[in-house]
Amino acid sequence: MADYTAPIRDMRFVYHELLDGDSLADIPSYEDFTPDVVDAVLEEAGKFTSEILQPLNLSGDSEGCTLENGVVRTPKGFKEAYDQFAQGGWTGLSADPEFGGQGAPAALHFLIQEMICSTNMAFGMYPGLTEGAYNAINLHGNDEQKALYLPKFVEGTWSGTMCLTEPHSGTDLGLIRTKAIPQDDGSYKVTGTKIFISAGEHDLTENIVHLVLARMPDAPAGTKGISLFVVPKFIPKEDATVGPRNGVACGSLEHKMGIKASATCVMNFDDATGWLVGQPHKGMRAMFTMMNAARLGVGIQGLGLGEAAYQGALTYAKDRLQGRALKGAESPDKPADSILVHPDVRKNLLTMKSLTEGMRALAIWTGISLDQAEKSDDPAAKQRADDLVQVLTPIVKSFGTDSGFLTANLGVQIFGGHGYIHEHGMEQFVRDARITQLYEGTNGIQALDLVGRKMGMHYGRYLRAFFHPVQGFIEANADDADLQPIVLGLAKAFGRLQQATGVLAQKGLSNPNEAAAGAMDYLNLFGYVAIAFMWAKSAKIAFEKKDDESGFYVGKLKTARFYYERVLPETSSLFAKIMAGGDSIMDMEEELFGASVAA
């Protein structure tokens, strides 16, 4: 099993030094989360995840979940770990104190999520889905629904799901067929089948509360006719205890590539009793409340797996003796040098390190902005923060998961043949990471969201929330001799992003396919520039503290240099592909795709 220690030193750097997360304590809602409290929470989370969750990761992957007589059993040890997780208050860390939560900032919560995903991503799916259900009911439910469900979610005795996808309807939710028939008592009878439902059935909590998209009899066609319903596994009694079993059951478990300890279910609703959440036919708005939060959470999953893969690969590279350094033996007293002396291994490790630490900074910048958007008393600051969250959400989700998958693959590469063997845990990271690029909207969908929606909204206001800070940093540090190579590199890459933005915006006005053809390349170009901005800000701080004896800041400077010289040049090829347009993609006739295999 790969080694893991929570990267608390880097987390503290990002939160306290790089992004001034301490300023969140000036917001009344977060006044209790002083630097000392934040550090204490990180320490405790690091202990819990490494001591309780990580030992179950490999065994949980091997055992998986089982379905017997309609009951799903999670792997050995999961129930006990979940009980400890709930008793420790982790299920309510970021929830509103009104419902028993601790009210922690999202930025701090993101760091805890990263640790959970590094140590046991499949376990993290269960509380993660509950958070999505909590958010939807908190924002769109009525007072009675909030009072019933939210305290149960917070204490961890009830869990939640998101039931969106159907066998014939994936991204296009306007095609869903699940029906909700109104009853005289104000409830609804919900009937239909949902697939790919994470945590749809399990043995961790006494009740499972499903949030289900369905259509009423009078619903208009398409997405404008979708409503959201709360459908509990057991119908609650008046005293908020569980009552009779509802008409909802797990029909089967999916046999998946990864996250095998997470129960992914086919859920059948057969005249199940449900209650409307929010307004009729406004379910898509409530669904996006869940989806936007979930997309950031999925980006954190990619980050967590990338960190775990990096740590495992680094430990292995230091210990694995194989060959000699090209300049001569570096450990002549040993039969061979460690593989860390080889340039290709070092390049792979530095790629992993630079992407992972850069993504951590970008994710926490998004988290702090989310906190400001939700809790700040300054309307202008709230608007700026929300604009930044809007534009960074598809990037954190897509670029974060793509880089996490790349990092996991590089980890296997460093292990060589041993990385391909299950017992070392590295190949599990690859399998687990693959789903992050697919669910909560595939990464191609994220690119379309960025280019097709976010780019042009409010006359480009969302983009300005990112462009202005980057331009301001470049101008403010243009004369800094220490930062000169980094500022110049950032300016060049940022210039490509600005030019690509103008080209795609212009092309999209006359031919939407042109913008869509370059959307994925544009999102990745944006991602590389965003991380470059994080590394530029990190380098500025590191130059000021490079004499620190720990070596932490020198390591930051050297990693920033590597990113700028060996990773950021990817923006050149992405820019070239965007400029090439979409003709070569769209000009191929459908029948020619199979011409090479035709008789």
Image (tube, rainbow, N blue to C red):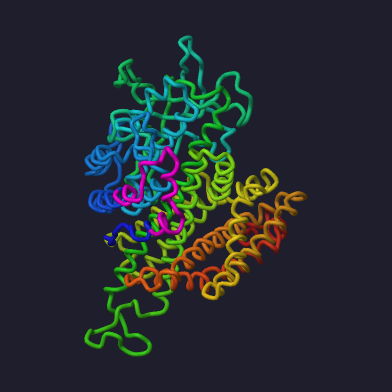
Q: Residue at x 49, y 69 (%)?
A: 563
Judging depth in this view, the residue of 448 and 216 nearest the camera is 448
Total numbered labels placed on residues in the image: 0
Q: Residue at x 34, y 54 (%)?
A: 118
**Residue 323 placed where, x, y %?**
31, 83
Q: Classify residue 547 by image quadrant.
A: bottom left
First to last magenta residue range: 13-40
**Residue 342 placed where, x, y %?**
38, 80
Image quadrant for the C terminus?
Answer: bottom right
Judging depth in this view, the residue of 595 and 49 nearest the camera is 49
Query: Would residue 449 be found to the left or right of residue 115 on screen?
Result: right
**From the viewer's perspective, is residue 592 above or below residue 412?**
above
* Residue 134 included in the magenta stretch of the image: no
* Residue 37 included in the magenta stretch of the image: yes
Image quadrant for the N terminus?
Answer: bottom left
User: Dominant secondary structure of the magenta stretch?
Assistant: helix
Query: Would residue 528 be found to the left or right of residue 255 on screen?
Result: right
**From the viewer's perspective, is residue 6 above or below residue 492?**
above
Judging depth in this view, the residue of 391 and 592 nearest the camera is 391
Q: Classify residue 347 by image quadrant.
A: bottom left
